[in-house]
Image (cartoon, rainbow, N blue to C red):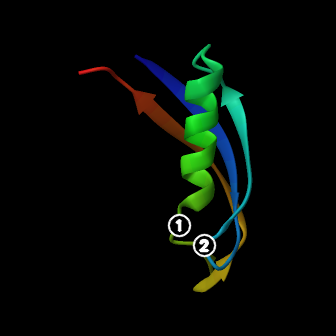
Amino acid sequence: MGIVVLFVRVSAKGAVTEARIEESTGSGPLDRAALDAVARWRFLPARLDGAPVDSEVLVPVRFRLE
């Protein structure tokens, strides 16, 4: 089990333009899996005065064994 926190830049169109590890799980394979997954995500873009804008967000990704 572990949590990786990713720093993600999101374009005004909701696409990930950059993702990097802010806090590692301590496991390289889990960190890479989180980065690979987030790179494929689409976000609802942030808005400023009603218009979509580029933004930055911290995304926690939790891994657990069941």
Q: CA distance from mark 2 to mark 1?
A: 4 Å
Q: Pointer 2: what residue?
A: 14
Q: Pointer 1: what residue?
A: 43
The quadrant of the rendering that contains the C terminus is top left
In this view, the residue in front, 55 or 25, is: 25
Residue 51 is drawn in which quadrant? bottom right
Q: What amino acid type is highlighted by mark number 2? A: Gly
**x and y percent of residue 54 in the render?**
72, 70
Q: What amino acid type is highlighted by mark number 1? A: Phe
**x and y percent of residue 30 in the render?**
55, 27
Residue 15 is drawn in which quadrant? bottom right
Residue 52 is drawn in which quadrant? bottom right
Q: Residues within 10 Å of mark 2 (few under 14, many from 20)?
A: some
- Look at the image and tell me whether residue 4 can be seen: yes
The quadrant of the rendering that contains the N terminus is top left
Please give the name of the residue rendered at 49% of the width and 24% of the height, measured from the top-left corner. Answer: 3
Tag 1 secondary structure: loop
In this view, the residue in front, 56 or 64, is: 64
Instruction: Using the image, determine if residue 11 lies above or below residue 40.
Output: below
Report the disc number at residue 66: none
